[in-house]
Image (spheres, rainbow, N blue to C red):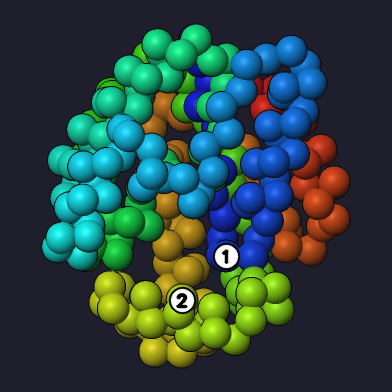
Amino acid sequence: MTVLITVWGASPGVGKSTLCAGLSSWLSGRGLRVDHFREEEVLSRPQFAAVAAEFETTGRVRPEMLIGATASFVDAVVASGDDVVIADALMPFVPTLLAMGQDAETIDTFMTDLSEVLAPLRPVMVFLDGNAESALSRAVAREGEQWLDWYLGKLAHYEVTPQVTDAASAVTYLRHERAVTLAAVRRQDWGLVLVERADERPRDEVLRIAQRGLKML
């Protein structure tokens, strides 16, 4: 059974992409066939073409579209024969659902449907936990103030709850997003590897903690 490792975190800048690259290299080095599904590739993958088209047309994504795209994704993974798929900020789509204004009941129903679609795979979430404020500051230091303006504008456009108007309110929202995401995954039969204080640790230490957690599952 192919293992799906989906990597999420408490905030941009917490190290998701770096960890995905490290896990991909580690697992490939063990002789496994690995598909590294990078964050920037999500809408360019054919399985998510319909999702991309809907978002470009309406600015929104319906939950049923995400379920359909995931079913196509699972079919492609099974056909590929890969041992592991590493997905950077893809599933379980909870931040996307929050951005679309979906409530807790809808998210719970979606997660049940998503888990059923993912049944041919073995889903595991690696969550990089940490201080959202410091991680966001690290992202700004790396990407620049223009990136922060873009990010705040995106959250404000989606009208997330709590409402985002500045960096401080973005941190408040990210804490809410973290809580909802972790609670949704814990209610499903997924593996969960929680890396605490990921924003404070060197990248090689974060990788070692994730490796240990994955070996224990």
Residue at 61%, 23% (x, y): give it. 34
Image location (x, y in percent) of residue 25: 75, 31
Label 2, residues with CA under 10 Å away: few <14, some 14-19, many ≥20: some
Up/down of 175 relative to 122, above or below:
below
The amino acid type of the residue labelled 2 equals Tyr
Residue at 67%, 27% (x, y): give it. 214
Image location (x, y in percent) of residue 8: 54, 49
Q: Is residue 65 left or right of residue 188?
A: left
Residue at mark 1: 12
Is tag 2's residue or tag 1's residue first in the polypeptide sequence? 1
What's the mark number on residue 105?
Answer: none
Image location (x, y in percent) of residue 209: 77, 40
Q: Is residue 183 visible?
A: no
Q: Is residue 86 visible?
A: yes
Tag 2 and tag 1, C-beta contact below 8 Å: yes
What's the mark number on residue 151?
Answer: 2
